[in-house]
Image (cartoon, rainbow, N blue to C red):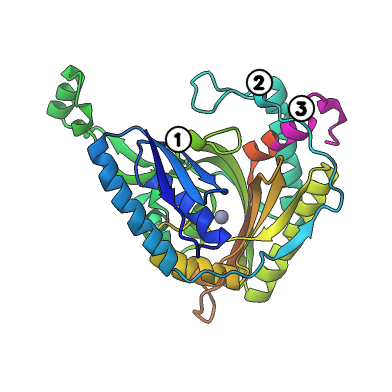
Amino acid sequence: MKIYCAIPSQFSLRQRNELRDRIPFISEHINMVKVNTSENKIVLEYEGTEEESTVLKSEMNTLIEHIAATRWIEKPAVKKYETKHHHSLPIKQEQQHPHPKKTSAYYNEVELALLEKLDAEMLAIAKQVKAQMRSYPTILHEQNMQRNQYHKNFPQHIYAVHHIPHQHKIIEQFRKSNEGQDQWFTHTGDYLQPCICYHCYEELGNQKWDNHHIFTAKGPCFRHEVEWKLNTFRKNEFMMREIVFVGDQQWVIFMREQLMQAVWTLFCKLDMTGHIIAAHDPFFHYDDVQQKAMFQLVTDAKYELEVNVGDDKHYSIASFNYCEDVLCEKYNITGRDGQALYSGCVAFGLDRWLAALFYYYGQDMKKLPL
Ligand SMILES: [Zn+2]
């Protein structure tokens, strides 16, 4: 069924977009959310029962109240860099990749070769600043998650790891059961990694350092996205390379700037259209949006490189994060004086770079300057 929801007339564009982006988290039975600008309404497609839809409507009202009560920063987004040329965008190559949810989704040899080339470019940037290479496990242990609190800040995105306990009886029961199998699984306390950098903090944690550190590592990362929003840019599982730097404040700020310029140079070499813009993390709770997200915007804690893929559509393909001393404090990473160090990270979504290249060079990969 279609459900309509009036957007309060006093809502700014930011609030309207926030409402549109938040509604999918109310229920898994929502299949589509669209803004009808001419009538100032949100239209959504809902698969639940009539009775459930009453609950949905009341939850939407609560959401609207939360959004209305949040003080939003309405300053225009700070753009660090923007491509000067606005060449006409190519027609999107819809057929280039299968939908990531289909089991037939795979990368072919051409795509794999491109992914390797892209990663080589990012690794070269990491090597320029003398990053040390690392490889970490895909599973992020419970103790690590407790330190960084990602699961509490972004519960909408986590994947938890479950196993069958090593108890003969339970293993047998699981083997025999055909339905209701979930009951035999126990949460290990661990998670699939949502990003790479927490491993670096763990490596440096509970120690005093008198030198700075810079690491680079890549690996598959996992985020539970809204199912109907999945596409070649937004995947539940994706490959990410990060460059992570820990040291004194001035050096960390300088390092983020230097890396941002290097990545921008690469983006321009690939001749795509986009910008680097101030951003914030997608905190779930409104207390966090109010405090942490707005603080990130005010302090320029996060920049994102967004590629333009037609109309007003942008996807973030890299982020440049300055974490002040927050994460070092959480992991007890200090200088000789016992004061927490500062840190930052730069993250590349390799699948997104690939999807962007297909968007721009789809039929003409031979022209790609890589
Ligand atoms: Zn990171």
Tell me which label, 2 or 1, sits earlier in the chain: 2
Tell me which label, 3 or 1, sits earlier in the chain: 1
Name the residue at 71% across, 57% down.
276
Q: Where is residue 139 in the image (x, y as percent from the top left)?
A: 43, 42
Read off the residue under disc 2.
Answer: 108
Q: Position of residue 82 (x, y in %)?
A: 79, 56
Specify the principal SS of the magenta part. Answer: helix
Pick whichever, 316 or 139, lies toward us: 316
In the picture provided, is 44 more to the left or to the right than 115?
left
Name the residue at 86% across, 53% down.
84
Q: How far apart are marks 3 and 1 (CA)?
A: 25 Å
Q: Residue 227 carries which label?
A: 1
Q: Is residue 34 magenta?
A: no
Most distant residue in the bottom direction: 337
Q: Which mark is residue 246?
A: none
Q: Quadrant of the C terminus?
A: top right
Q: Quadrant of ligand 1?
A: bottom right
Pick whichever, 22 or 336, lies toward us: 22
> Do labels 3 and 1 touch, CB within 8 Å?
no
Q: Which mark is residue 362?
A: 3
Three-letter code for the amino acid on which mark 2 is drawn: Asn
Q: Is mark 2 on a helix, strand or loop?
A: loop
For mark 2, does the 10 Å Cα neighbourhood hold few (<14), some (14 to 19), or many (20 or more) residues?
few
Instruction: Say how many tags the image has.
Output: 3
Range shown magenta: 356-370
Name the residue at 63% across, 69% down.
300
Q: Where is residue 192 in the image (x, y as percent from the top left)?
A: 42, 42
Three-letter code for the amino acid on which mark 1 is drawn: Glu
Determine whether 302 is above or below 270 in the image.
Answer: below
